[in-house]
Image (tube, rainbow, N blue to C red):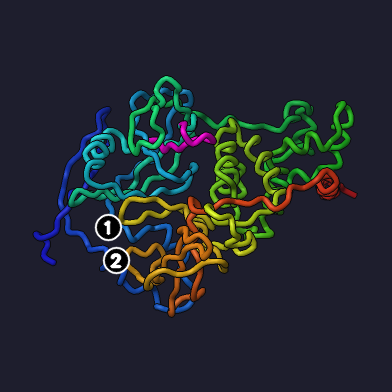
Amino acid sequence: MSEEGDRRPRFRRYVGSENSLYSVETSSASSESDIDDNPESDGSGEFDKSLPATHRYLGKLDNVGGYTILDEGQVIPGMLAIHTNTLVFPGFTLPLVLRDFETDQLLEDIKKGYMFVLISTGKVKTKLYEYGVIMEVYETSARRGVINLKAKGRQRCEILPDTMTRNPWARMQKLTVKILGEPNIKSPISNSQLQTLRARRTNFGSDYKSLMRNYKYRRYHLSQYPYASWVYDHNELSYLVELITDNLAKFYVKEHLPQDPTSLSYWFVQNYQLTHEERLDILKCPSVLERLRLELRYLNMKRSLICGRCSIEIANQSDVFAMSREGVQSNYCNPGGQVYETITVSEAQNYTTVGEPSKQFTWFPGYAWTIIQCKCCTGHLGWLFTSNNHHPERFFGLAHSCLDIKKIKLMNDSDSNAVEGDESKQMQVS
């Protein structure tokens, strides 16, 4: 195809003045089919898990750069809000395809700062949830009335109630938001130790190993307070991180889990199999300490993936595995602009395939997708991905919006006491 026959605008931000300047340039674009047909590495062996996170199916995108952190408490009136059927937390990527009537409004708002707020419905589906996530566009392209973009979650925000729309299903709207910060959480006993002793053997630490190193002296120190030592342990970020990563090691490789408390709290909610209501509760938590404590409680519940329409079991939690470096649950967009939060599993049951395999607009380069639906109610479930050149040769991508999360077992008091006893043993120092 000639360069003159297919041209698209490319946006560039010039930084250095209070009002950012923009220019529009033109460059040739590759077709979606060309992107899908490009060979992958050596064409065989293990699949490169960094590829899905690039979202190559969107075509060539131009970098519009930047990493913006807004001030805590800042109120932004009239900010563009986009509603999707998915939740994206800070640090994770949202791909979008926006068409026709949506593009003019979006182009103008992107030029004002490359930021928008991602919103969703609340626990009551007829109302907009009062919290959202500020997204920053970092790659985009526009051609033939279509905008393809990738945005990264930056910060949580609160939607001020006087601006909340009566129609929670509106794709785009203007809202006034208030930026929420991440309070600095310190050890509950950080200011209770003499400075001379703290230099020799501190009673707290930034990580679990340093906490355990002097735990015997920590217990001596805590004996002067009215509560048991485990009460203070459960308010140490490093202790909660260790408990959560140990529990997640049943399903994920522990070395691949974030060790930073804030990153782990967002990684958990983006990758663990949670209900919509549970994820909203985590989004609402005002601090990383409260998020981790709530997530530790959710870890005590066994779960399975069931059909959202007829509730027949589709996959077990043990079948979940990662096909992307971002984790087991990532967001992908189809050509029509529909965003799917997709859970990758090695095995599924109670499904039937529909149609023939296709590599067009595939989210996993080198794999062909086939639609799967529930064999009971024929409801859409997701896709079967197959390849003759990569390992694994097949896996399933289940659409989170088409599933329900079934909590198989809630730990009873005796089980909880047993776990608490095991946790206490971990903190014993001979």
Residue 326 at x, y = what percent?
A: 50, 55
Residue 276 at x, y = what percent?
A: 55, 43
Q: Which mark is residue 60?
A: 1
Mark closest to the chain's N terminus, 1 or 2 = 2
How many neighbours does mark 1 have within 10 angstroms: few (below 14), some (14-19), or many (20 or more)? some
Name the residue at the front extreme.
Answer: 377
Q: Amino acid under label 1?
A: Lys
Tell me where residue 55 sits by quadrant: bottom left
Q: Which mark is residue 35?
A: 2
- Above or below, 16 relative to 58: above
Name the residue at the left extreme.
Answer: 4
How many neighbours does mark 2 have within 10 angstroms: few (below 14), some (14-19), or many (20 or more)? some
Q: Which mark is residue 346?
A: none
Depth check, front residue: 148 or 226: 148
Residue drawn at (48%, 69%) of the image: 352
- As for residue 119 lying within the magenta part, the answer is yes
* Residue 172 relative to residue 205: left or right: left
Residue drawn at (68%, 39%) of the image: 293
Question: What is the number of callouts on the image?
Answer: 2
Q: Quadrant of the N terminus?
A: bottom left
**Prevailing secondary structure class for the magenta stretch in the rendered image:** loop
Depth check, front residue: 210 or 322: 322
Label 2: element kind: helix
* Residue 101 relative to residue 349: left or right: left
Q: CA distance from mark 1 to mark 2?
A: 9 Å
Please say whether residue 355 is visible from this viewpoint.
Answer: yes
- As for residue 122 lying within the magenta part, the answer is yes
Residue 351 at x, y = what percent?
A: 52, 67
- Above or below, 57 relative to 292: below
The residue segment tinted magenta is 116-127
**Labels 1 and 2 touching (C-beta < 8 A):** yes
